[in-house]
Image (cartoon, helix red, strand yellow):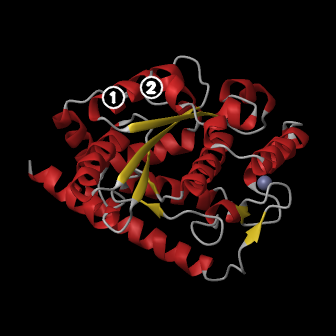
Amino acid sequence: MSVFNELERRVEARMKKYKRVIVSYSAGKDSTVLLYLAKKIADDYGIELYAVHIDEGIAGHSDVSRRIAIKVAKELGVKLLGVSLKEYFGITIDELKPKFSLPPCAACGPMRRQLINDVGLRIGAPIFTGHNVNDDVETLIINMFRGERRRFLEPTGGPGMVPRETPFIDVSEETLEKAAEELGLPYKKEPCPYAKLSMRRKIIKHEMATRPKEKVIELQKVMRMIKAFHVTKLKSPRFCKYCGSPSASSVCRVCSIMKELGMLEERIRRTRERRKKFRIEDYIITDRWIS
Ligand SMILES: [Zn+2]
């Protein structure tokens, strides 16, 4: 069980400084291992723990993830908050796909990130995610060779952002897979059906899987260095002129997506309403999901 001791040590080191913690829980292998360890540590230290699961509204995928999420949260005794993109933004990923110029992942990622940050702000807790070294390198490479300076420089901290903790960021995918298998808890094994649309990600994923994990970690260090060099050039933090979210430019990713979909007015209205009269139960489906 040494792999668990090592992983637990990483989670514990990040978690023990907080009184309240949110785990971003997709029901995949990484976040399942994270949630299991977070629960153990939360009990040891008396930390208040929430799991947040996002329903993207992808037929045949989101419903399976949701069922697993509920089962595992019940089994572990963790309070599960369920939020759907439909309720929050007014559109599911399935509905968005035919209307959007880019692959759906290009909308799903920013929407999920913004939603989860909002939940963190409301609850007043940092977000723990299960990202591993392979995810990190994949994302860095893709954003860099897409030439998406804005995405590459998307703020990851500062005003309006809750702290993000990634205790497994130096851990290989392989290690987490082994850990998830050993746990014996159910987790979602099939990737999102839209992930296969991203050919570049697939190629990079395959390339990394065939390399020793030490090489991947080396590559991550180089990529991080390049990013750090660019980020220091970034001016003071900005906020989106439509929704007020932290953003690398005057309009955030989500608002520019909504604009393309012709939903910007609705987006502004929803944001305004949420701000005026905020009650966490308005958009968190906890009880409906848990019962
Ligand atoms: Zn915005």
Q: Nearer the viewer, residue 145 or 126?
A: 126
- Classify mark 1 as within 8 Å of ligand 1 or not, answering yes or no: no
- Dividing the picture into quadrants, the one containing residue 153 is bottom right
How many residues crowd mark 1 within 10 Å: few (<14), some (14–19), many (20+)?
Answer: some
Residue occupying the point 34% across, 68% down = 218
Residue type at tag 1: Lys
How many residues crowd mark 2 within 10 Å: few (<14), some (14–19), many (20+)?
Answer: some
Cα distance between the residues tagged 1 and 2 = 8 Å
Q: Position of residue 74 (x, y in %)?
A: 33, 28
Q: Nearer the viewer, residue 259 or 226?
A: 259
On the question of residue 50 being in view, the answer is yes
**Res. 290 mark:** 2
Looking at the image, residue 72 lies above or below residue 52: above
List the residue tagged with mark 1: 74
Residue occupying the point 55% across, 44% down = 200
The reply to whether dot 1 and dot 2 touch (C-beta < 8 Å) is: yes
Q: Nearer the viewer, residue 5 or 280?
A: 280
